[in-house]
Amino acid sequence: MTTLRVIVEEALSPVPSGVSRYTEELTRALIATAPPRCDVEGIVAASTEGQYADILDRLPGLTGLHKSKLGRRQLLSAWQHGFTRLPGMIHAPTLLAPLAKHDRLNTRGQQTVVTIHDLTAWLSPESVDYRGVGWHNSMVKRAERYADALVVPSHTVAQQLGEFFDFGDRVRVIGGAVSPSLRVPADADERAARLDLPGEYLVALGGLEQRRGLDQLIAALALPDSGDIPLFVIGPDDNGSGSLREAAAAAGLRPDRVVPLGFLRDADLSVVLDRATAFVLPSLLEGFGLQLLEAFHFGTPVIHSDTPALVEVAGDAGLVVALDEPDSFAERIAAAIGSVLTDSELAASLATAGRDRAALYRWDNSAEKVWQLHADL
């Protein structure tokens, strides 16, 4: 029996994120697509019995759960400095991995694969706290020395990575997909009423750090082309860069034009995305853009920047806003919003193209590529 040991620690993150969803969905798909005589074991930091039970409940089919004696913070530090090792075939859905020197050619069954989702720590370090930048630098340097392979979600990230580090032919591009749990629930009307969703609204992701471009979207709402449509924002209202309502007030908008929703469970998220007039992703930097695929999945028209990863993932299914002239970016966002609001044929075309595009990305395909990668090693 061959066991793939997956580090599922990020699935226990108290704050939902693209990385935590990626970890959970990929692990679930690895279990479902395991080849004959192969199984999957999870690895987590020291946690509570409730958290252990939660992981086993969310990931049925795990053949075991390796429970470190170290808590999360201690484990991050220990693996950063190479103090602890784990035997076997290890897959890390992030850079958090026990990377150490080993004989790649002659040590059968000993291999470690890590994942880098984006180059934010290097391309936009101001978006990451200084400890996070230091940890990422340390871990990617260890990966450069000791990892058997490196997974990235897009060719864009692969290219960007090559500008900073030399992984040679060890890089594999394996993207993500929409979670099967994202589907319109039977009580959608009740949820929409509780969330106070109007007939028309935009939806975007929270966080006012510069790389997300949300400040430009808020500025666009103050321009005539965007009409009087409100914006509902999923995620943190205030992450240290100021609150959304403060940003809206500074742009001269009424308080009801920008509505923070906080973090949503999948059923509520599905309703919000499904009923939105458009999803707007004006990011200046992305590694993949899973949220873009999620909006596509529901047939919601998507407006996005031309940052390379988003163009790669979206193909021609979204309405693209160029970043090349920053001073007029907000005006171009407003014009794109106005186009979707006033052109029903355009909106319908984007909806159809989005659904088709999202269907090209499947978790079972991603998992099968991971299994093949480990088999190749």
Image: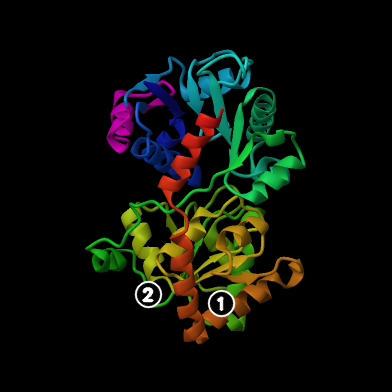
Q: Residue at x 36, y 35 (%)?
A: 31
Does residue 133 appear to the left or right of 175 in the view shown? right
Q: Amino acid at mark 2?
A: Pro
- Given residues 105 and 329, the one toward you in this image is 105
The answer to which quarter of the image holds residue 193 is: bottom left
Residue labelled with disc 2 = 198
The answer to which quarter of the image holds residue 3 is: top left
The numbered dot on residue 306 is none
Numbered range of the magenta stretch: 39-62
Name the residue furthest left: 186
Does residue 234 appear to the left or right of 266 in the view shown? right
Residue labelled with disc 1 = 337
| Image location (x, y in percent) of residue 5 | 44, 25
Q: Nearer the viewer, mark 1 or mark 2?
A: 1
**Residue 243 to residue 354: above or below:** above
Q: Amino acid at mark 1?
A: Ile
| Image location (x, y in percent) of residue 118 | 62, 45
